[in-house]
Image (cartoon, rainbow, N blue to C red):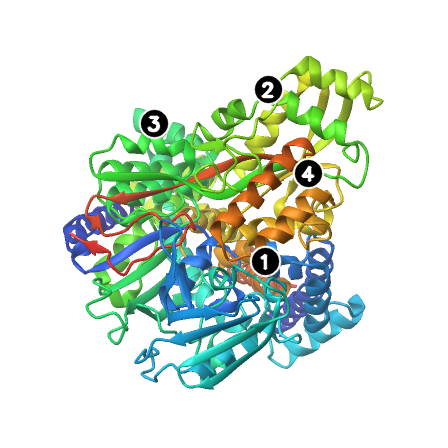
Amino acid sequence: MRLAAFLLRRLLGLLGVLLGMSVLIFGIIHILPGNVAYAILGEFATPTAVAQLEAKLGLNDPLPVQYWRWFDAMLHGDFGMSIVMNRPAASLIGEALGRSALLAGLAFGLIATGGIALGLYAATHRGRVSDKLLTLAQFVLIAVPEFFWAILAVLLFASWLNLLPATGYAPLDAGVADWAAHLVLPVLVLSFGLVAHVSRLTRSSMLEVLDSRFVLAARARGLPERRVLWRHALPNALLPAITVLAIDAGLLIGGIVVVETVFAYPGLGRLLVYAIERHDLPLLQVGMMVVTAIYALANFVAELLYAALNPRIRVAGASA
Amino acid sequence: MPLSRRTLIGSSLAAATAAAIRPAQAAANVLRIGISTSLSTLDPMMVTTGDEYIYANLVFNGLARMREDLVVEPDLAESWSFSDDLKRWTFRLRRGVKFHDGQEMAADDVVASFQRLLDPAGTSPVRSQYDMVESVSAPDAATVVFQLKISYGGFADILTDRQVKIVPRSAAAQLATQPIGTGPFKFVSYTAGDRLVLARHAGYFEPGLPKLDGAELRIIPEMSVKIAALQAGDIDVLWDLPLEQVKPLSGRADLRVDSIPTASWDGAILNNAIPPFNDKRVRQAFHLAVDKKEVVELTLFGQGVETISPIPPSHPFYAKDVVVPKTDAAAARKLLAEAGYPNGIKLPIILPVGRPVRERLGVTLQQIAKAGGFDLQVQRLPYSSFNAEVSGKAPLYIDGFFARPTVDTSLFPFLRSMGSWNERLWHYSDEAVDRALDAARSSADPAVQKKNYIDMQAALVANPASFFAYSVNYACAYRKSVGGIKTHPMKWFDLRHATLG
């Protein structure tokens, strides 16, 4: 029962966030400088042509009317048209989202496994040369932004070694090997900083746990070190890592815009940048809503996971 | 740690597979061109960017086309003739031309294409350029007649332009998604942010052409990645190479770099409607203050040439004998003093963010013009808000224009009093210039046109409209395996004879 109430409350909160964000997104987008009619007409924009196009696109109506038209249509499953490309926004975003999800999914897998594994390794080799080297590498990876790694990776692997393609996407029907080869660099670059982030955090939380009394007690009782590490320390050390992973899912969306642009990967990030450049407001609005929804959902899932994994929360829920 | 080891093994495996498949990639007879931005439209009538022009010229044909040496030759028309008053133009169409869907092109398709372009309720961005057309008709299946409102000597020339392509009258509605044309390549698929895929049009009207099986436009926004992709062989052609890359890439054995003069120009727009540039002397002073040769060196790394007007020095109509006053900072300050600015002029110069060459031009001018009494403050604005907020309004800003297919279309709207672009840029009016422009367009005789355009340039030196800095070069880089492509000054590609060796 309590779990159901907790879920319901969280879900309502989620809807509230989305609703509020829809107003915010609409508002921000409409105070952006520039004008879609100019963007469409390009260097051929004459004042009459601009006025005509604006009327045709319904851009002369008051903002609340435009907002309601957009929101109402979304409720009815109509996500509008990209006014620059003259194609349905839903299918454009759907295709791009699928490709971004692939990139993000692979990167997230690498971040979770690689980050936790490296963190554990560093924690169990505390103070040794390998730990110090890892720490140095982690700081460098966190401090240097993705676009630097991206360009460095292209120069190294594509230009110099000629091992991997410089750009990040090949359709699946061009062959699985080709498709996979194109994914290697974007996934690696996207993961770099966040692997370092997660492993730093895993290391410190593992160290904290290893220094705690119950680990001392377990060792005092003569349990084998392997059992102390895997059965007692690890599950406790992972809790903060899960929270960080959920936050990183949000950071991942930011990183994806950069990585997709550098590697010419046709995902959601590129599409959003394109929509901003060309002032394609309907496309931008829907794209931002999708990103907001993903972010909110990631946090929602993280909360659920945390509640499910943390025995203290479970105990508190049962005894209250 | 088993997990980390597995990850490591996984990624090295992926890299190894990648290495194994690399050589196989270049085998297909498909030319891959690296371009910069996603196409916004597949409808040839709506194209407005260089990336889109490439597509429009591969998939569609116009009635006439322009060669790399700027000579106009028949395309879908076989020949044309005009009445003595230059108001009635008759085009004989080529027979047996097939659209990509197999239908034969007829005069009705040409009429429908132009009616669509001229439709006042339509959204064609270039409709105003065809204002002079009164009616289009098809007396028979192989003849199209244009009746013009004015005498216009360059009418066949403007039909080479990028938006006036012939589309099937029955398929206009699907142009945005499944475009059909008569061009050497037909549309296969388009993924925004990734690539546009074209395939050979087997029924193309010139036998044996095109030689390629297909072409792909790869959209790669990041220049360093595009160059890496060219070096790695992921693309065969790099379109519109930044001019600072011309020298470094020219040294590479596997590449061919072409840098050719064009009629595209950049300049500082001087607003003639408001102070300080409403005074002719201030405009003259600006020209005296700046050495255009130095501007070309600093802004374009020498990949361009200084000019008087949008007519480039490479054009036969360029006024090479007109004397342009020498740079003289003292004379510039003296003129400013006469105009009522004894202490020089302090004013902002607005630069478009994201157009690196034009940004460089602005900073160069700010540095050079100082000695002549112009104290310019650089302001940067996103180019997307330029049209709405800067054009025709700010006293001084940097802008530039793509080459247009004819001298008339690159001059008349810009410099004729009340011309459509004149009104949106500098609000210039000069009787001698107006007279020359009017006389040039109402003759089909190149000698008459040349004389008048040279007069116009002389008038422009005496009474400057604005600061035309230079005609900018256009560069492309090709892998050595690419043959049969001449770099086109209009920045599109003619791939009919292209080969991959």
Q: Give the alpha-carbon distance from disc 3 to disc 2, as whole Å.
A: 64 Å
* Residue B168, horizontal then vertical, whole percent: 43, 80
Q: Which residue is label 2 attached to?
A: B326
Q: Is residue A244 visible?
A: no
- Chain ID at mark 1: B
Looking at the rendered structure, whether the residues under marks 1 and 3 are on a common chain is answered as: no
Q: Nearer the viewer, mark 1 or mark 3?
A: 1
* Residue B104, horizontal then vertical, whole percent: 34, 83
Q: Secondary structure at mark 4?
A: loop
Q: Nearer the viewer, mark 4 or mark 3?
A: 4
* Residue A3, horizontal then vertical, whole percent: 60, 70
Residue drawn at 30 percent across, 68 percent down: B184
Q: Which residue is label 3 attached to?
A: A133
Q: Nearer the viewer, mark 4 or mark 1?
A: 1
Q: Is residue B64 left or right of residue B212?
A: right
Number of the label disc, if any, that sits on residue B465? 4
Q: Nearer the viewer, mark 3 or mark 2?
A: 2
Q: Earlier in the sequence, mark 4 or mark 1?
A: 1
**Outermost residue toward the front?**
B84
Callout 1–callout 3 Cβ contact below 8 Å = no
Q: Earlier in the sequence, mark 1 or mark 2?
A: 2
Q: Is residue B201 left or right of residue A246?
A: left
Instruction: Decide: is B351 above or below A87.
Output: above
Q: Secondary structure at mark 2?
A: loop
Q: Residues within 10 Å of mark 1 (few under 14, many from 20)?
A: some
